[in-house]
Amino acid sequence: MKNIIGVHKPPAPPKAAPEVKFITIDDESAGQRLDNFLMRHLKGVPKTHVYRIIRSGEVRINKGRAAADSRVQAGDVVRLPPVRVSERQQEKAANPAPAREFPILLEDDWLLAIDKPAGVAVHGGSGVSFGVIEQLRRARPQARFLELVHRLDRDTSGILLVAKKRSALTHLQDQFRERETGKTYLALVAGGWPANKRVIDAPLHKYLLPAGQDGEGERRVKVVAKGDPDGMRSVTLVKVARQLAGFTLLEVTIKTGRTHQIRVHLASQGHAVVGDDKYGDFELNKSLQKQQGNLGLKRMFLHAWRLQFNHPSSGERIELLAELPPELQRFVDHVPAPKP
């Protein structure tokens, strides 16, 4: 009888323990908030952990404690404590975003303006492995700096700005924060929007869906009463672009940039954005999805159409336009005008 000898694999070598790192701030990173700087360098580390190591004093700037909103300057030395990245995040790093370019509306040495398609997140996170910015970085490995200036909802199409220099990013973000930009969207809503309803000034409050509800833990936004301590002032300007049978095409300009602002404000007036799966008319959306041909609509009808801003280098006032995507234009063109 032959002896059966078990084959034993040698134990896997132990994983190298994470070590303290010291990073010297270069000119491109100068002026950035500490928390944003860390999230760029500690890819895969949860936001909550990033803020925890700042609060605990494990992150240091020039050997001193610092706050999340401290600004790093060229020549500063930032101490990063040992941090572990989850296996899921390691796997994600090993399978980077696919390279992808997007339709370009404007590009120079300072910025890139693209026409983002619907269905693409602007960045990874919240269950999305990657977004526009990760795909752009992958497509442009020679680019030293690419950062989102602002954001669009995943299901919203249209103009998205990306900075190619740190100075351009801060300059453009300051304009957005100080409301010096002009942001106008095209939105199709259910029903006939009253032409005299031109301003919606209603505070908004962000919250998470409670346990037991569909979409538990998802972020939502609602209108709250003026004076509510949790409300953020939100102002939306509305202009009727075209009346259609059963719908109205609106030009919507936001004076404040709150999460889901347009969607929630329009729905609060009884005229939800068509195709909106969070705040819309679900029965109407379902019926439009089932329609064949040009009267079928399988996405939210919200498009970042026009953007005005001052160029970060020349100061010239720039106006960009992104025409309606074909699937939205076809729908509008084939809905009849309202009966007189």
Image (cartoon, grey):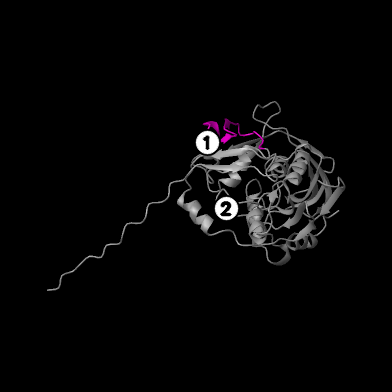
- Residue 271 picture location, percent across and down: 73, 45
Magenta region = 54-72
Is 289 rendered above or below residue 263? below
Residue found at x 76% / y 54%: 113
- Extreme residue toward the left, this view: 1
Amino acid carrying label 1: it is: Ile
Q: Which mark is residue 244?
A: none
* Magenta highlight on residue 58: yes
Amino acid carrying label 2: it is: Val
Q: Residues within 10 Å of mark 1 (few under 14, many from 20)?
A: some
Q: Quadrant of the N terminus?
A: bottom left
Which of 166 and 263 lies nearest the eye of the viewer? 166
Q: Which mark is residue 53?
A: 1
- Residue 269 picture location, percent across and down: 73, 40
Q: Quadrant of residue 42?
A: top right
- Left or right, 181 with reference to 75: right
- Residue 300 picture location, percent across and down: 68, 54
- Left or right, 145 with reference to 41: right
Is 179 rendered above or below residue 334? above
* Magenta highlight on residue 100: no
- Left or right, 175 with reference to 29: right
Q: Quadrant of residue 263?
A: top right
Q: Main secondary structure of the magenta part?
A: loop
Mark sitting earlier along the chain (2/1)? 1
Which of 166 and 201 lies nearest the eye of the viewer? 166
Q: Quadrant of residue 295?
A: bottom right
Q: Which residue is mark 2?
A: 128
- Left or right, 180 with reference to 120: right
- Residue 333 picture location, percent across and down: 80, 62
